[in-house]
């Protein structure tokens, strides 16, 4: 009877060990544990065409950033999982280790560098403005004084327009909301990153508005990481360098902006 009890006990221990072994998850870029599958958890605010957006009826997120981060992940040997997070919640999510990186048309600046690290720049942008086609009073950024301007909340566009002084700034959730406000005569101009403005006019076939050529700023976009994750930063920079060398970056750029960088 004692031998029988011992056998049952040993069998139970073996079963429990096997069950626990089967519970292991896939690797995160930040954890380094688990099975051989490696996952790069990416945060992005999916409302910033042509960098990140979702067309109706499409499951996968689309855009320049989405194609680029998937190519980077492939080069690194990682599967890429993208989470849609509001722009102002991206850095807190990174600090809480809910994600490994941020790619969301995020400008590299000193304020953000206090909280995160950045990859090498992957895109140079700048702030431009869109006005109605019949607008005659606004021809440059200096002409915005005394006017109402729509910007996306939490972006460098909002910061830059506020610094102009004498401008009534209306902060809205998405670029699309800003353009709707312009068309509805709720504001006199929209200030956004140049590719966002150009993409809106070109892809939507929108009439009744025009983009002005002047740039208020020149800005570099980077992939944000936790400040202590230097190993992942190095891997991403190396992958980005290879994509530029082998021509894959140029292919992605041409797909979304119509020409090589």
Image (cartoon, rainbow, N blue to C red):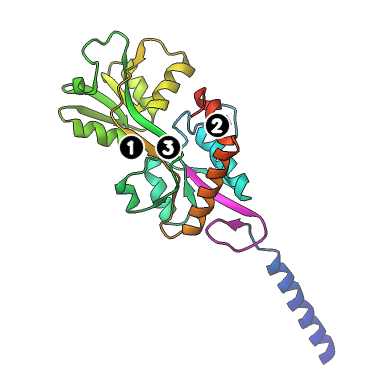
Numbered circle sitting on residue 105: 3
Mark 2 and mark 1 lie on one chain; the one further toward the N terminus is 1
Q: Is residue 16 magenta?
A: no
| Distance (Cα) linking label 2 and label 1 | 27 Å
Whichever of labels 1 and 3 marks the residue nearer the N terminus, that label is: 3
Write down the region rendered in magenta: 27-45
Q: Which residue is mark 1?
A: 155
Check if mark 2's residue and mark 1's residue have beta carbons within 8 Å.
no
Spot occupied by residue 212 in the image (x, y as percentages of width and height):
32, 18
Callout in the foreground (2, 3) = 2
The quarter of the displayed image where residue 134 is located: top left
For marks 1 and 3, give the CA distance. 10 Å
- To which quarter of the image does residue 168 belong? top left
Q: Is residue 144 above or below residue 45?
A: above
Q: Residue 250, labelled with which disc?
A: 2
Q: Residues within 10 Å of mark 1 (few under 14, many from 20)?
A: some
């Amino acid at each position: 009877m004692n031998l029988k009890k011992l056998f049952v006990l040993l069998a139970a221990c073996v079963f429990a060990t096997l069950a626990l072994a089967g519970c292991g998850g896939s690797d995160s870029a930040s954890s380094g544990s688990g099975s051989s599958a490696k996952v790069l958890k990416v945060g992005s605010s999916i409302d910033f065409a042509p960098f990140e957006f979702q067309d109706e009826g499409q499951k996968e997120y689309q855009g320049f950033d989405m194609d680029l981060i998937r190519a980077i992940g492939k080069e690194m040997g990682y599967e890429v999982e993208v989470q849609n997070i509001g722009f102002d919640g991206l850095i807190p999510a990174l600090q809480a280790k809910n994600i490994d990186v941020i790619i969301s048309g995020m400008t590299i600046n000193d304020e953000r560098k206090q909280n995160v690290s950045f990859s090498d720049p992957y895109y140079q942008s700048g702030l431009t403005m869109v006005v109605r086609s019949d607008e005659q009073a606004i021809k440059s950024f200096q002409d915005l004084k005394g006017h109402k301007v729509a910007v996306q909340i939490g972006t460098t566009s909002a910061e830059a327009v506020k610094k102009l002084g004498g401008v009534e700034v209306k902060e809205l959730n998405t670029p699309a909301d800003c353009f709707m406000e312009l068309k509805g005569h709720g504001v006199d101009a929209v200030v956004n990153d140049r590719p966002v403005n150009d993409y809106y006019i070109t892809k939507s076939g929108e009439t009744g508005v025009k983009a002005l050529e002047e740039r208020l700023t020149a800005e570099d976009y980077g992939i944000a990481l936790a400040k202590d994750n230097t190993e992942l930063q190095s891997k991403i920079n190396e992958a980005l360098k290879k994509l530029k060398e082998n021509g894959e970056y140029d292919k992605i750029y041409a797909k979304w902006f119509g020409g090589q960088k």
